[in-house]
């Protein structure tokens, strides 16, 4: 096994450290780790640094706090930045997300609590997902009067099949860890609180294989994925901008904030 580098490198909202061939990338925006371009950019920056570090063979993506990632925080301007950027020079959330596909090192995501909306999209960029009975997954975009995003057009049917992907996208329903395991959305289900250790365990199994072989296999298996993800997000951005101007979108966000069932009118 390779020599460890145990000191943590902080990028502000994201940090990483390398030990025993495994690079742990952790998000630090508790309790919900809401998405924003800056956060996704820092995850991609961490992946890029790890890609060029021979001591790292596998990445574990995790987060501190109650939830893995609650998606966009639509209660404030930051959460809407991916839909209505404040300035034309500001990078779009999805343009930063495409960078997550640049590397050759496998990624294992440890999912505690919720992976919702764009948070589910972030989880789906990983090669493997470790969940617990309390993990919650939802592509809740349609329940907000909105089009799905973060490349779920590409990643979700790839993992669970087109029919199940359509069901989750159309209904926006929430599924728990046991159902997620059954449909293949998570790869291993462990006791609550043990998801990070389990992710590190799987990463260590992968790290024990020949690193050049693993990286070559990943490049082969993910060949064309960056282009497919970008094509998906390019279309998703267009549809999200269109639907963001509708009354249904306003109603969906308001209903979520008020914790009630939305009353959509198709306008």
Image (cartoon, helix red, strand yellow):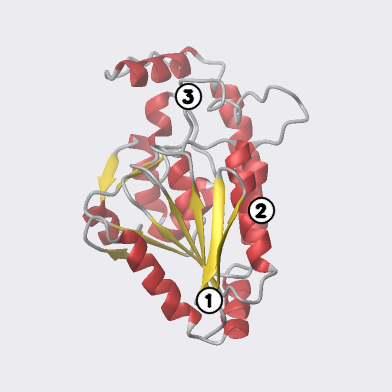
Residue identified by numbered label 1? 21
177 up-or-down from 245: above or below = below
Q: Nearer the viewer, residue 250 or 194?
A: 194
Q: Is residue 263 above or below residue 145?
A: above
Mark 3 lies on residue:
74
Q: Measure how far apart labels 3 and 2 are at the Cα level.
A: 25 Å
Dividing the picture into quarters, in which one does residue 95 lie? top right
Q: Is residue 68 left or right of residue 42?
A: left
Q: Nearer the viewer, residue 77 or 137?
A: 77
Q: Residue at x 51, y 20 (%)?
A: 76
Instruction: Kindly identify which residue carries mark 2.
Output: 45
Residue 136 position in % (x across, y down): 30, 45
Disc 1 from disc 3: Cα separation: 38 Å
Q: Position of residue 260 (x, y in %)?
A: 27, 18
Q: In this rendering, is residue 64 above or below 107?
A: above
Q: Position of residue 186 (x, y in %)?
A: 34, 60
Local packing at callout 1 (Cα closer than 10 Å; few below 14, some 14-19, many 20+) is: many
Give yes or no for contact between labels 2 and 1 (Cβ–Cβ under 8 Å).
no
Crowding at dot 3, Cα within 10 Å, few <14 / some 14-19 / many 20+, comes out as: some
N-term-proximal mark, 3 vs 2: 2
The correct choice, above or below, for 81 with respect to 233 in the image is above
Rendered residue at 65%/49% (across/down): 230
């Amino acid at each position: 096994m390779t020599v460890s580098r145990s000191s943590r490198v902080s990028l502000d909202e994201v940090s990483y450290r390398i030990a025993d061939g495994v690079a742990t990338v952790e998000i630090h925006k508790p309790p919900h780790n809401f998405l924003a371009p800056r956060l996704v950019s820092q995850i991609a920056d961490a992946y890029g640094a790890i890609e060029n570090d021979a001591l790292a063979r596998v990445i574990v993506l995790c987060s501190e706090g109650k939830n893995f990632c609650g998606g966009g925080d639509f209660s404030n301007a930051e959460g809407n930045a991916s839909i209505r950027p404040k300035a034309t020079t500001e990078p779009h959330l999805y343009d930063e997300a495409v960078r997550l596909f640049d590397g050759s090192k496998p990624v294992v995501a440890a999912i505690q609590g919720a992976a919702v909306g764009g948070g589910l999209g972030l989880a789906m960029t990983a090669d493997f997902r470790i969940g617990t009975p309390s993990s919650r997954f939802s592509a809740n975009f349609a329940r907000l009067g909105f089009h799905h995003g973060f490349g779920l057009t590409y990643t979700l049917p790839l993992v669970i099949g087109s029919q199940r992907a359509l069901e989750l996208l159309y209904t926006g329903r929430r599924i728990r860890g046991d159902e997620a395991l059954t449909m293949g959305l998570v790869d291993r289900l462990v006791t609550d609180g043990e998801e990070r250790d389990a992710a590190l365990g799987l990463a260590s199994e992968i790290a024990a294989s020949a690193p050049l072989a693993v990286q070559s296999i990943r490049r082969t298996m993910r060949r064309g994925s960056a282009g497919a993800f970008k094509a998906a997000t390019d279309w998703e951005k267009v549809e999200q901008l269109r639907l963001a101007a509708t009354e249904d979108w306003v109603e969906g966000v308001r209903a979520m904030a008020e914790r009630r069932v939305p009353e959509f009118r198709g306008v």
